[in-house]
Image (spheres, grey):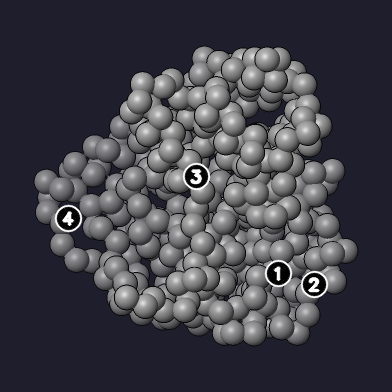
Amino acid sequence: MQLAAAMSRLGTETAFEVLLRARALEAQGRSIIHLEIGEPDFNTPSHIREAAKQALDEGWTHYGPSQGLPELREAIAAYITRTRGIAADPAHVCVVPGGKPIIFFPMLALLNPGDEVIYPNPSFPIYESMIRFTGATPVPVPLVESRGFSFDLDLFKSRLNSKTRMVILNSPANPTGGIMPEEDIAEIAALLAGRDVVVLSDEIYSRMTYGRPHVSIAAYPGMKEKTIILDGFSKTYAMTGWRIGYGLMPPALVESVNKLMVNSNSCTASFTQRAAISALNGPQDEAEAMIAEFRRRRDVFIDRINQIPGFRCPMPEGAFYAFPNIEATGWKSKALADALLDETGVACLSGTAFGEYGEGYLRFSYANSEERLLEAADRISRFFAS
């Protein structure tokens, strides 16, 4: 069977590959500490689970509108208005099964071969994968450790040209945990103001900040009309398996995204949407307690891994990832990640799983217990001491 040429341009997500390897080792009786997968280790808050059960009992098991239930889109618009400081219209909200369709669908709708997309590197690997799949050209801009893993803005300016069709931003960021400074966002907004460029702003970790507040580029003058905000429920509410996300986008894009939904998924599951309404409108105490626990774990884990010879890890300002620089160990990133899994049972990801500029780094998810995080650090220390 001969596959379409576009399939050769499609990448993957290394986290799931490493998870598969780690589980295979566990099946052999090995003790594995899972710091590879970007998933909260908490249960979905109880009131959200109860809302889903009630929705099933009430018969929310049938097709719904492709754009999403009106009640959920209204709740999302109110939430975006409240948290981003912009007037969000429910008519411009599209509800989709997970966050990835808000990467894929707008790219399919907007990009042609020859178009260029500026994106951060290292970053979520699906950005580059989807850019290449559409036939457009990915244009990476490195994230600079000395700038808190924000762009080198001089390089950003140099790569912005008449072919640039889209710019991707991700703050707080996967894999670095970095948050773009407001002055950087303001400068990018000013650079894009007069251009026919769409911004895909991945804000899935917007609630997971530990000091510096989240700021959306959509709040800057003239930017709401050209910004797609990607957000969802997976991270904030520990709902990864529920597969529900959303985008707020310019009106001209809504119809295209709805068409792509009709052709691919028909609609997002109705009972999960009812649960999502409860997530946004219900009590926030469990979600806030989870985020506070991530902050506590961050402080403990970063302090400990910075004691490992050859490791240097800036304090992440958001998300739940540590991204230590390991250049001083003398190891290449993938070789060290593989060795740590095989020799110590610590599952983490190579920085190169997130792009070429991730060389010299590892990514650890600290979505695990303090006990297991400290045990992981101890195992790594023993590995280098042996």
Instruction: Locate the N terminus by quadrant.
Output: bottom left
Q: Residue at x 78, y 27 (%)?
A: 310
Front residue of 100/14: it is 14
Which kind of residue does numbered mark 2 sit on?
Arg
Q: Relative to 36, say whether 308 is above or below.
A: above
Compare marks 1 and 4 and give the one earlier in the sequence. Answer: 4
Q: Left or right: where does residue 71 sit relative to residue 202?
A: left
Compare marks 3 and 2 and give the one earlier in the sequence. Answer: 3
Which kind of residue does numbered mark 1 sit on?
Val
Mark 1 touching mark 4, by CB under 8 A?
no
Which kind of residue does numbered mark 4 sit on?
Trp
Specify the label residue 15 is tagged with: 3
Q: Residue at x 85, y 71 (%)?
A: 158
Compare marks 2 and 1 and give the one earlier in the sequence. Answer: 1
- Which of the two marks, 1 or 4, is nearer to us in this view? 1
x%, y% of residue 95?
38, 63
Residue tagged 1: 139
Q: Relative to 264, say whether 282 is above or below.
A: above
Compare marks 1 and 3 and give the one earlier in the sequence. Answer: 3
Instruction: Locate the C terminus by quadrant.
Output: top right
Q: Report how far apart the C-alphas of labels 3 and 4 lie in the structure.
A: 33 Å
Q: Secondary structure at mark 1?
A: strand
Front residue of 296/250: it is 296
Mark 2 touching mark 1, by CB under 8 A?
yes
Residue tagged 4: 60
Mark 1 touching mark 3, by CB under 8 A?
no
Q: Relative to 167, say whether 2 is above or below.
A: below
Compare marks 3 and 4 and give the one earlier in the sequence. Answer: 3
